Image (tube, rainbow, N blue to C red):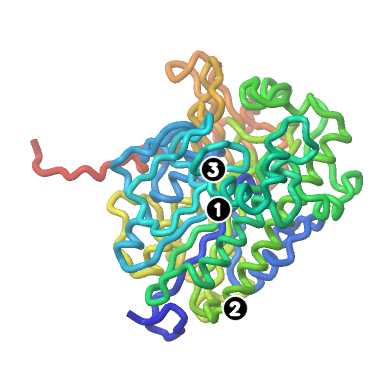
Amino acid sequence: MTDATTTTAHTRPNILLICTDQQRFDAVRTYGNQEIITPALDRLASQGVLFENCYVQSPVCGPSRASLMTGRYVHSHGLWANGVRLPDGERLVSRNLADAGYDCGLVGKFHLDACFGGRTERRTDDGFRVFRWAHDPYRGSSENQYHRWLKASRPDLYEAACDPDSAVSFDNMPTDAHYSRWIGNETVEFLRSGREADKPFFFVANFFDPHHGFGAPKEYTDRYDPQRLSRPVTRGGELDNKPPILTEASHESYAGHAPGYTSYTEEQLQEIKAAYYAMVTLVDDEVARILRTLDDQGLADNTLVIFTSDHGEMLGDHQLMLKGPMMYECAVRVPLIMRWPGVLPVGERRRELVQWIDLAPTLLEVADAPTLPRGQGESLLALARGGTGGWTRDWALCEYRNSGHPYEVPVHTTMLRHDRWKLVTYHGSPATDRERTGELYDLQADPRELDNLWSDPEAAQIRVQLQEMLIDVLVATQDRSQERTAYW
């Protein structure tokens, strides 16, 4: 097999997937946010293709990440909520890549199984030769590789972070001991000496940040003045004509397990935004180190680099925090940047609606590997190259099935994005005893999603059309992969 460092037209490329946790689409400067500092990601976008409208399949981690790895919708792959294990019969894109001769590795989060209370995520047949798992900085699992590293390298900081009375936390750890630096270190080490040099590689760098709890090393928080940052996108009385669960979540996030928007002062909300931006900038610096390593190792020209995130963060917008049953753009739309020198154009943007399930078939086409037998996505390679004429899917689907901290009366929501419209159905009986209601936004006239047209008589016809289309989409995305062997 050709050496992975060789760059000929016939060499299958290496694939580097960099994924953050809870990074909204506009938490990258090149997406239009002039407040945030992300020079590495901006440069990556200038060297490749940026997708402006990439939607995840769920606004919470586990179901979304399962859709990434299987290329399947939430109602198909079965990991419908955090804390649910991906069924054993589901096949991962990494398994196909490994079978096709790729050296596969991962560092950081995976989240295809329950990880609560210090338990270790059970491995599936994932194809990863290198698996340096750490669900997040906090959980004390015996298999948390970050904790093992920190204990060995900085036992003083590890003990301090575990002490509830200490000023040191895993969030504000000095940069050289921080979780994001560890992810960067492990990725750099794999690129330098940890890979099998006679094979192309597929490596996943799963950063935990910018997930809450909203902290970063002082050198990064000092780069942002909270009071100079923009205020949350909202207006007085915004939630009055929106589904009642949003008012409930405004007071208490995560079904009462975390503070809500109304728990914070205006000053505290600004401090949270500054900390969130600081976390992103720290990740950006680690991305810069990783990209420099690709250059130093002679790998850059033959490596497809993808940057994305598993879902967004409300960050005070619409009087909400964190994530959950809400389907606003800042919760379900994520950054997606692809760079492949000499193959993809540079500095271009794609406005088409794409989804996270499209990444798995993209990777497999790039690797000339067999498709996933039950995959439901479409490869983005032709679209990224500029072949927009062949892209016909003009909708995106996102699902929440009481998927985060469960509400006592379950909350089930489904989003359909189509053309200029977004429909969000909050399901009622028989799915749940909650009231059937919803949201409808004209994203062309109201890109900030402030005016809910669900009950507007003038929008009644488009609402009915979208609700009917949603039913059709759910039928179209039903898993009918089981072979039919006869007519009866």
Q: Position of residue 182 (x, y in %)?
A: 62, 56
Task: Name above or below for residue 436 compared with residue 445.
Answer: above
Q: Which amino acid is tagged 1?
A: Asn
Q: Position of residue 277 (x, y in %)?
A: 76, 50
| Mark closest to the chain's N terminus, 1 or 3 | 3
What's the residue at 31%, 55% (across, down)? Answer: 372
| Mark closest to the chain's N terminus, 2 or 1 | 1
Circle 1 Cα neighbour tier, 10 Å, few/some/many (<14 / 14–19 / ≥20): many
Q: Which residue is mark 2?
A: 295
Task: Name above or below for residue 81 compared with residue 436.
Answer: below
| Mark closest to the chain's N terminus, 3 or 2 | 3
Quarter that holds the C terminus: top left
* Furthest residue in direction top, as rendered: 433
Secondary structure under tag 2 reads helix
Name the residue nearer the viewer: 107 or 445.
107
Mark linked to residue 135: 3
Residue 421 visible, this orientation:
no
Q: Which residue is mark 1?
A: 206
Measured in 3D between alpha carbons, the distance from the residue under mark 2 to the one under mark 1, in whole angstroms, is 21 Å
Mark linked to residue 444: none
What's the residue at 91%, 44% (across, down)? Answer: 227
Q: Which amino acid is tagged 2?
A: Asp
* Furthest residue in direction bottom, as rendered: 8
Closer to the eye: label 1 or 3: 3
